[in-house]
Image (spheres, grey):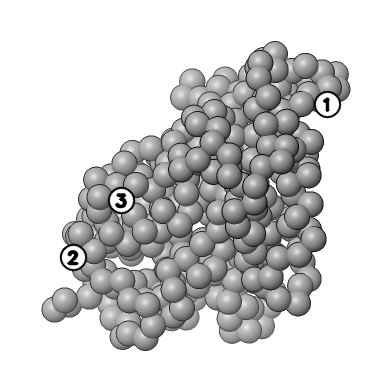
Amino acid sequence: MARVDLTVMGGGIFGLSIAWEAARRGARVRVIEARRIGAGSSGGIVGALAPHVPENWNPKKQFQLESLLMAQTFWAEVARAGGQDPGYARLGRWQPLADAAAVQIAQARGAEAATLWHGQAVWRVIPRPEGNWAPISATGLVIEDTLSARLSPRAAARALVAAIRAKGGEVVEGEAKAEGAVVWATGYAGLLDLTAAFARPVGAGVKGQALLLAHDAGDLPQLYAGSLHIVPHGDGTVAIGSTSENTWDDPEATDAQADALLAQAAAACPALEGARILERWAGIRPRARSRAPLLGPWPGRAGHYIANGGFKIGFGMAPKVAQVMADLILSGKDAIPTGFRTDEALA
């Protein structure tokens, strides 16, 4: 490559998505991942792309809504460019309702969704569907939303790498030279670096553990029950997760907390009773202090930018993050919303 317009430091979902969007627009890009692609939380197994509840609307929820609505086109273009399937499918989600009060709240949120989601997706209360995949519900009712989608995190990373290379971009594991504008999308370690650089708390890591099960649920919706995501994937597996741990000894070790996830999932979804565990996964997810992604210029470092903090929502936010960061870096258009901005958090 004769000239590099943009270097992305970090081969997780934010870094790869920004690199792809810039390459798609004609920029020459280089991704440098110090370890391996998806080495951090982006190499996980769950892949739940799910919306915030449709109430108390704010810029973060609007940004996420726009990103989830962009996702089908975004991932289809990635797949066409590189010839790799990211495992995306917008199949919706079911959530059980425990009591009359929960039903009333869910119905009110459904009315809000009709306005806030502009008819592009629905949130509604329906009778529990028949069959043993639907979650156990004390009321016999569940929330159904048609906005939630699934994505295979590792397949998505492979698809992005293939798409970037198909556009003439470089993806390097190990050391390489940064040229042009530089985006720092370095996850949990990057948040610690920012905390040290600015001498203030910028963000930290939260450990998550998850399980991958041998169970083919086909194209049924994902489930959300008791804070547990249960996500059927297209390869005949189901991912369940995850824990949230603020202290740990080994960031990549699993323990009894991971094993307990299967019992929780089977209690919510009878179809998973006795399912064989294929993989146990653990990793550290980057959580910015604001709990929203941290996006924008690196204060005091001309030509350097930050894209970090996609705690739990990084895959769902990625298409919109890629769009606004490419707009900012390549054309100077700043559409980063309040609450996400580096000039608010770091300046």
Q: Amino acid at mark 1?
A: Ala
Residue 85 picture location, percent across and down? 34, 47
Q: Is residue 134 above or below residue 23?
A: above
The residue sitting at 69% across, 70% down in the picture is 253
User: Quarter holding the C terminus?
Assistant: bottom right
Residue lying furthest left in this view?
2
Q: Which residue is mark 3?
A: 84
Q: Amino acid at mark 2?
A: Gly
* Marks 2 and 1, the one that precedes in the sequence: 1
Whether pointer 2 and pointer 1 mark residues with C-beta atoms closer than 8 Å, the reply is no
State how many labels appear. 3
Q: Nearer the viewer, residue 310 or 180?
A: 310
The residue sitting at 65% across, 47% down in the picture is 276
* Front tag of 2 and 3: 3
The residue sitting at 68% across, 59% down in the picture is 209
Quick check: can you spot residue 16? yes
- Quadrant of the rendered image containing residue 137: top right
Q: Is residue 271 above or below residue 82?
A: above
Q: Which residue is mark 2?
A: 168
In whole angstroms, how far apart are the C-alphas of marks 2 and 3? 16 Å
User: Quarter holding the N terminus?
Assistant: bottom left
* Marks 2 and 3, the one that precedes in the sequence: 3
Answer with left or right where residue 223 lies relative to residue 263. left
Q: Mark 3, residues whose alpha carbon is within 10 Å: few (<14), some, or many (≥20)?
A: some
Q: Secondary structure at mark 3?
A: loop
Residue 36 picture location, percent across and down? 44, 73
Per the rendering, the mark at residue 194 is: none
